[in-house]
Structure formats: C-alpha cells, structure tokens
Image (cartoon, rainbow, N blue to C red):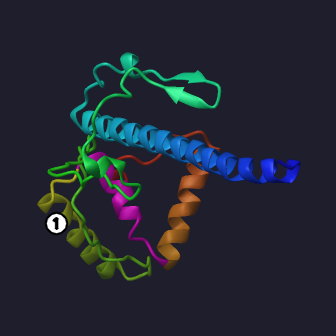
Amino acid sequence: MSQSSVQGSLKPNSESSRREEIEQKFQQRDREISELKEMIGQLLVNQNKGKRIEGTSSRRKDYHGDTFSSPSENEQYSSHHNDYHYQIPPRRNHRVRDHHPREPKIDLPSFHGKDDVEEYLEWEMKVEQLFECHQIDDEKRVTMASLSFQGYALYWWAALVKDLRLRHLPPIRYWNEL
C-alpha cells in the first residue's frame, strides 16, 4: 500500500472524529447555557420575592481546561430550556414599590410678575386654593410656586435666591415668607 493511500484513508476518519468532537463540545456548551438560563430564571424569581437562591454554592462551576463541570450536569431540563431562543416568561403582578409618596400633579397658573397688583392677588388666591385642595405641605409650597414663575417673576426669584446665598441667609422656606 502506498503512503498516499494510507493518508487518504486516515483523512476521512480524522475529519469525522474531529466533527464528532466539535459536536460534543457544542452539546456541552448547550447544556451549560441551559443551566445558566435556569439559574438566571431562578435568580429573577427569587429577586422578586426578596429571597436568596437555595443551593447556590452547590451549583458552583469548576473550571477544567476548556470545559466547565458541575455537580448538576446530569439534571434533566425541560425541552424549552435547551432552546437558544428561550425567553424567561414575563413577571406577573410585579409592583414597583415607591418609598417616596408622590405629590399629586398640579397645574399651577403661571405668574409673570407684572406691575398689576390685582393679577398678583388673583394668582396668589388661585395657588393657595390648589395647595389647600391637594393638601400640599407648607415646606413644599414655595418650591412649587416658584416653578410657575415666568418672565420678570422668574428673574426676580433667581436674583432673590442668589442674594440670600451670597449673604449666607437661609432660603425662603414657607409660603407666607414669599
């Protein structure tokens, strides 16, 4: 037998064994990815419940060369966990807890700060009604009212705040000081 015929007969076997080796590595990666998806799913579920995953330390991965091994490699997963396109189901009844109660949205009338006294008094009465109706704290009223300033009133407010800071005086905190 010639040397070229020996090499030719070895080539298909080495290609098929190489192909099998690659397929085995892909299957191993598929199992690892499936396990990671399962762990992520459990993390998300337990995070929502405020609990720690049980048995996390038993699922520790040990690195050996180019592969990972796990005590749970023999675990059976449902068929959808082996799919690369598996998506974790959406959370149901998920409530975001707001630790800071929000003030109701109030549309305050704008105030331009013109020389019209009646316009100012009308604005002040309307704003006072809204604050009372929505039960806004006295300390928040100044901040909210200043947000409605426009034009000259806005310039006046910015200058007043700056002047108080420069003179190291406390800021205006209450509605009746405004």
Near-viewer residue (10 or 51): 10
Q: Most extreme residue toward the right, as rendered?
A: 3
Near-viewer residue (93 or 107): 93
Residue at x-position 51% and y-position 78%: 151
Near-viewer residue (98 or 76): 76
Q: Look at the picture and state if 127 lies above or below 25.
A: below
Residue at x-position 41% and y-position 55%: 84
Residue 36 left/right relative to 7: left
**Residue tagged 1:** 129
User: In the figure, residue 56 lies in which quadrant?
Assistant: top left
- Residue 107 drawn at (x, y percent): 27, 72
Quarter of the image with the C terminus in it:
bottom left
The segment highlighted magenta reads: 137-150
Task: Give, as a three-letter code, the residue at label 1.
Answer: Gln
What SS does tag 1 mark?
Answer: helix
Badge 1 crowding class, 10 Å Cα cut-off, few under 14, some 14 to 19, many 20 or more, is few
Asked if one can make out residue 129 in the rendered structure from this viewpoint, the answer is yes
Magenta region, mostly helix, strand or loop?
A: helix
Asked if one can make out residue 178 in the rendered structure from this viewpoint, the answer is no
Near-viewer residue (39 or 90): 39
Does the segment drawn in magenta span residue 146? Answer: yes
